[in-house]
Image: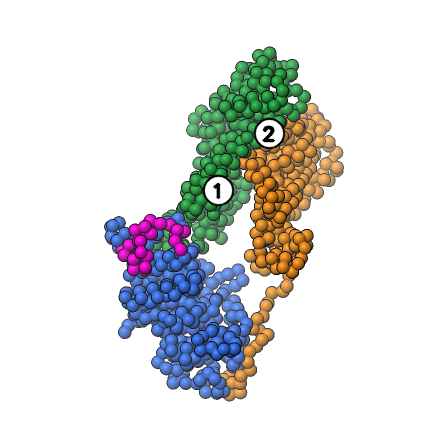
Chain colours: A orange, B green, C blue
Amino acid sequence: MAEITRERFKVIGKNTKSMESISRPNIGYWQDAWRRIRKNRIAFFSLCLIGLYILLAIFAPMFSQYDYSTQNVNEMSQSLSSKHWFGTDALGRDLWVRSWMGARVSLTIGFAASIINACIGSILGGISGFYGGKVDMLIQRIVDVLYGIPSMIVTILLMVVIGNGVHCLIIAMCMVGWIGSCRFVRGEVLKLRESDFVAAARILGVPDMVIIIKHILPNVMGLIITNLTMAIPGAIFQEAFLSYIGLGIKPPGCSWGVLAKEGIAQLRIHPYQVVVPAVLICTTMLALNLLGDGLRDAFDPKLRGTE
Amino acid sequence: MAKYIVKRVLLAIVTLFVLASIVFVLVRLLPGDPFSNPKMTPEIRANLEAYYGLDKPLPVQYVTYMKNVFRGDLGYSMKYEGRTVNRIISESFPFSADLGIRALCFAFFFGIILGIIAALNRGKKLDFLCILIAIIGTSIPDFIMGSLLQYFFGIKWQLLPVAQYTSFRHTILPSIAVGFYTLASVSRLMRSSMLEVVTSDYTKTARAKGLSEFRVTFKHQIRNAITPIITIMGPTVAAVLTGTFVIEALFAIPGMGKYYVDSINMADYTLVLGMTIFYGAFLVIAILIVDILYGIIDPRIRLSGKKA
Amino acid sequence: MENLLEVKNLTFSFHTYGGVVKAVRDVSFEVRPGEILGIVGESGCGKSVTSSCIMRLNPEPPGFFEGGEILYKGNDVLKMDKKALRNIRGTEIGFIFQDPMTSLNPTMRIGKQIEEVFVGKKNMSAAEKKQKALEILKLVGISDGERRYKQYPHELSGGMKQRVMIAIALVGSPSIVIADEPTTSLDVTIEAQILDLLKNLQKTLGTSIILITHDLGVIAKLCDRVLVMYGGKVVERGTVDEIFYETAHPYTKGLMQSIARLDTAKGEKLKPIEGTPPDLFSPPVGCPFAARCEYCMDVCIDTPPETYTLSEEHKTCCWLQHEFAPDTDIKKTVIKKGEVE
């Protein structure tokens, strides 16, 4: 504490500089989200793991001496070894190659179905929410009815009719899968449309298109991406489920669901044949779920700027 | 409230109508002609023709079919000679319902407890453990969960039977396998709902009244935190149902799910479609009941007739 | 007369991710029987935290007491075990919260919520409890008590809910009621009703009230004595008249100038206090108000001001009262230079 002297008693008035000091640096929305995802170790690790799986799915089958469908009677149900990293299945097929071939199918379906669903849902939900009126009525009535029908039932029905295979799976899953994101995007857009900053833009004479692109889209994009991330594990799970009950990919083609099904048949004697696809499915779902959690936090404006 | 119920019931009826129509259209779209299968016996063929009126024009077929469906007549199986879909359902449904109810009880009971424990110990090790269980639970597909349970409890440690459904001991593993996913999502929701309540103003009021922590938790917090859980009952019933499909097949339980999966694999189209209509109707009604129940439980909705 | 409540050098902080927030710093005051004590200050000045401290209603952790004592009828609240604390809450000290909309349990009937105050305290039959609840409902101006008794909070209007909150605070016949901004979330017309009700109840029941508000109008209408808080500290205290007519702290003066009064001349502009309150993560070393003070001096920035006693009740924490300080329109009327409070 300084000495109390007479000279120090002189009115100097307000200190305008320190009065409203803002100590945080200015940072954009996406920059901030990306910074926070990187800081969130669990989410970042999850992102890396998914990246690794995608790379392995692309390259692992190319650089292996084995083929995913060639059966080998001499090497049936061999355990994990340096020759067969993940062992072989009951028909002597190499599980390392089959796993990553399966990953190609499962991940393709998971990502494709979710992205298509998110696109259809966002467009319809966006139109419905932004324009309202008759279009909204029509879309919402369709959504209400379809929402009541359990999606798994519809997907199974469609699969029974249109047959098996990757394309059919994706088509079947997209028939009703968009409803969730449609409802959710509509709700968000409706909220934004009524918000004061959109009203302000309207009053300034900003055209609809610009309002959508500049004001509404950036505000729902984070949420759409988060939802998309959360939807991918659901789609992968659905594929595995359908393949498991005999509707998805047919042998010799393979997906993680098919591998799990084949493995479960060998459960009593060769449990590792379940463990391999089980670990792959579970870690992927886990990583995507955790990434989704991380993204939700990263995009949450309430948590902005916090460490 | 009455208006709300009427609206929901009407919507449910339209939904069922649409579902039945979709099934009808899909039957016509089935690859090839499923009814001229050479493996079919003349008896089955005759039954099918009588049911669908295959010789009559399409609109007449549609009307006949709709009448049948709404009377609750779902037709004949193509593979099980002389058996109607109705009979197969009435024989197998009790098993599925039993498994489903056990799984739901297991999931909600432990899910809610886990969520409460996590919220009350926020940020501590116990909370972390509960979150871990929840996240793992949502990441393991039920058939993998089921086969892991079978392997460890049935084969490796020989603690519980892995197949059949005849005694309480037999029901434990399948119930856990079906309910685990739901348990995980219930506990996550309960945790966040509880956290909201813990910091709420009325909790502060309750404390200011000089109530014990026990009473604050049980009388004020849990009662309010549990209401949102009911909203996920609908989707939960659907999740448990799809869970029973595979778990019944896995544990050799003679329930509907097993027949459903079998009929898909044996291309018994009429059985698949009939059961699909049944499942659809069941779910639509279940969700309807849950929605109405929610309105009754939450006094705010009960009186205003609006969803909060 | 003996003081009901004495708060001495209270310091309360919160652990947060960003560090320790010093919400209340070295606050002392006392509450006398049958008086209304006002605590005034802007958002985040620590007035709500201070009041919650008295009943230990701040979550601990993350909050924690760094020092001081709170003596209720001679017993230190900070040293009480859970049971003793529960006996004080509700029956000795009542609390009226800021937002009646969210402060009542939405799933519990009104009557039940009022009766709960007696749970685990007095041995009373259900009929007696109901009797008490109906009495208090009538007292706070709710006419058809029998019907309201069975209703849920969402069936009541905002003003009604606040009356119920007051009923909850009063039903245990406490000797002190803490009202934390009881009218902030209400309409102006309802606000006047509720304030009148509080004043009347205080007169008839003889309860002391600690009234926390940011509204000087409310203070003028109800209070006997006033504490002015800023940046977690008490900067000025005194009787209502002293605070309003012999303002001795630039912050209090700023508050006065920022509101419209009957004697505000036509064309005269209201003067807001510019700037924002200090960051309590790292409170300023000197006077907390220094950065926004038009009379700021060098000494204010690095040395915490001493407390100056201006009259029996009137004290202020401002260097302007120092003998070296220049003359300004804030009068120097020190009768005693006190030690730092």
Measured Cα–Cα span from mark 1 to mark 2: 28 Å
- Give the overall secondary structure of the magenta segment: helix
User: How many dots with numbers?
Assistant: 2
Question: Subunit of mark 1?
Answer: B
Side of A162 where C105 appears, left or right: left
Crowd class of label 2 (few under 14; some 14 to 19; many from 20; radius 10 Å): some
- Magenta span covers which residues? C132-157
Residue at disc 2, secondary structure: helix
Q: Earlier in the sequence, mark 1 or mark 2?
A: 2
From what the image shows, is residue C234 above or below residue B124?
Answer: below
Instruction: Give residue A163's quadrant in the image.
Output: top right
From the image, tell me which residue sits under label 2: B22
The residue positioned 38% from the left and 71% from the top of the image is C221
Query: In the image, is residue C149 part of the stretch drawn in magenta?
Result: yes
Q: Say which residue appears at 50% left-offset and 61% top-offset.
A: C16
Tell me, yes or no, whether the highlighted magenta stretch contains residue A278.
Answer: no
Q: Which residue is mark 1?
A: B231
Q: In the rendered structure, are the residues bearing label 1 and label 2 in contact, judged by CB atoms less than 8 Å apart?
A: no
Q: Nearer the viewer, residue B199 or B173?
A: B199
Q: Which percent across, then down, holds residue C288?
A: 50, 74
